[in-house]
């Protein structure tokens, strides 16, 4: 695995552009924030469970690997781990090009046209370090000639540590079925969601109305993950006995693009005109105790 590095007195970030533009390791003052990638080869279908990868042009699943939009229905490839559904978009399965690199910034770009998405599309990521702050900017651009639904987000595998605790606020919780797809039932939530290393069973939570802040506390310090619109949805997934939590800032709920237009605002569906882009920024801020 060939990697690029950004590093300052607090952060150490390794990137693997050819492995789907992934963050392969992220440390704050030597502490593994995400589970480091240790695989020797990259499988774009059975991808390694670690690091951080980009979710573009959509997050999570499209039901039955089908996209119905603009009066047309397109069949996408089924993902074996989510069959009969598709999973997590195509951006993180592709090799990315390095557009710019210096001591504080790395910019990656990827162009795609193929069976996994009906429109030609451009993906971009920008990673920047400034003191105790890491920012990751995401951008997806419609290179086609018709309206395109689009979404984006990040999929971090937060390494579980003793006495670690994560907490976040969401205004809504989407009920999901056994295939991890929304049933359409949404309930209000006014309680702080707290996860810690004592969690010993699977947790799968799809949230809407996220306030844009995730707080992760460690004995060594505190990590704040901050963002804003369009990343107003949040996914928390903790597989049973896994050494990580997946805590994902995203722009839409699973299968949002297949919902009727009257529900697009609630589901987070956004449409891009030809040459239009959707962007988001996620900041990771480390505060030492």
Image (tube, rainbow, N blue to C red):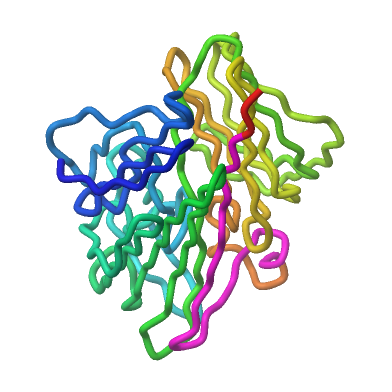
Asked if 95 appears above or below 60 in the picture, the reply is below
x and y, in percent, of residue 72 in the image: 43, 78
**Residue at image x 47%, y 69%?**
68
On the rendered image, what quadrant is the C terminus found in? top right
Badge count: 0
Residue toward you, 15 or 53: 15
Residue 214 in the figure: left or right of residue 81: right
207 and 42: which is toward the camera: 42
Observer-nearest of 37 and 92: 37
What is the quadrant of residue 73 in the picture?
A: bottom left
Magenta stretch holds residue 284: yes
Instruction: Give the extent of the magenta segment.
Output: 263-286
Residue 258 higher or lower than 111, as above or below: above
Answer left or right for 185 relative to 1. right
Classify 271 as above or below 8. below
Residue 186 drawn above or below residue 21: above
User: Residue 254 location, x and y as percent?
Assistant: 54, 50
Residue 85 placement, left or right of 224:
left
Which quarter of the image is occupied by the N terminus?
top left
Q: Residue at x 51, y 15 (%)?
A: 161
**Residue found at the far front of this picture:** 9
Question: Residue visible at 42% across and 32% down?
Answer: 27
Q: Residue 55: image x %, image y %?
A: 43, 54
Q: Position of residue 44 (x, y in %)?
A: 22, 46
Depth check: give the residue in front, 81 or 41: 41
Q: Is residue 227 magenta?
A: no
Q: Determine the residue positioned at 25% across, 74% down.
A: 113
């Amino acid at each position: 695995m060939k990697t690029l590095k950004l590093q300052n007195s607090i952060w150490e970030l390794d990137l693997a552009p050819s492995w789907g533009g992934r963050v392969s390791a992220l440390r704050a003052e030597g502490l593994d924030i995400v589970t480091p990638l240790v695989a020797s080869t990259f499988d774009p279908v059975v991808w390694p469970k670690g690091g951080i990868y980009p979710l573009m042009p959509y997050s999570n699943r499209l039901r039955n690997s089908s996209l119905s939009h603009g009066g047309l229905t397109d069949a996408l490839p089924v993902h074996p781990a989510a069959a009969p559904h598709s999973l997590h978009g195509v951006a993180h399965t592709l090799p990315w090009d390095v557009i710019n690199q210096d001591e504080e910034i790395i910019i990656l770009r990827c162009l795609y046209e193929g069976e996994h998405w009906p429109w030609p599309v451009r993906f971009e990521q920008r990673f920047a370090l400034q003191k105790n702050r890491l920012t990751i900017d995401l951008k997806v651009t419609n290179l086609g000639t018709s309206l395109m639904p689009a979404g984006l987000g990040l999929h971090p595998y937060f390494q579980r540590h003793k006495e670690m605790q994560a907490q976040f606020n969401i205004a809504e919780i989407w009920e999901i079925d056994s295939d991890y797809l929304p049933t359409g039932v949404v309930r209000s939530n006014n309680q702080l969601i707290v996860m810690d290393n004592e969690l010993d069973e699977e947790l799968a939570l799809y949230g809407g109305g996220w306030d844009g802040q995730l707080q992760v506390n460690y004995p060594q310090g505190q990590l704040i993950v901050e963002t804003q619109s369009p990343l107003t949805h949040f996914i928390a997934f903790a597989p049973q006995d896994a050494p990580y939590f997946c805590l994902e800032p995203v722009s839409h709920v699973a299968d949002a693009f297949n919902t009727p237009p009257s529900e697009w605002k609630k589901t987070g569906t956004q449409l891009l005109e030809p040459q239009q882009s959707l962007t988001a920024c996620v900041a990771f801020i480390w505060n030492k105790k």
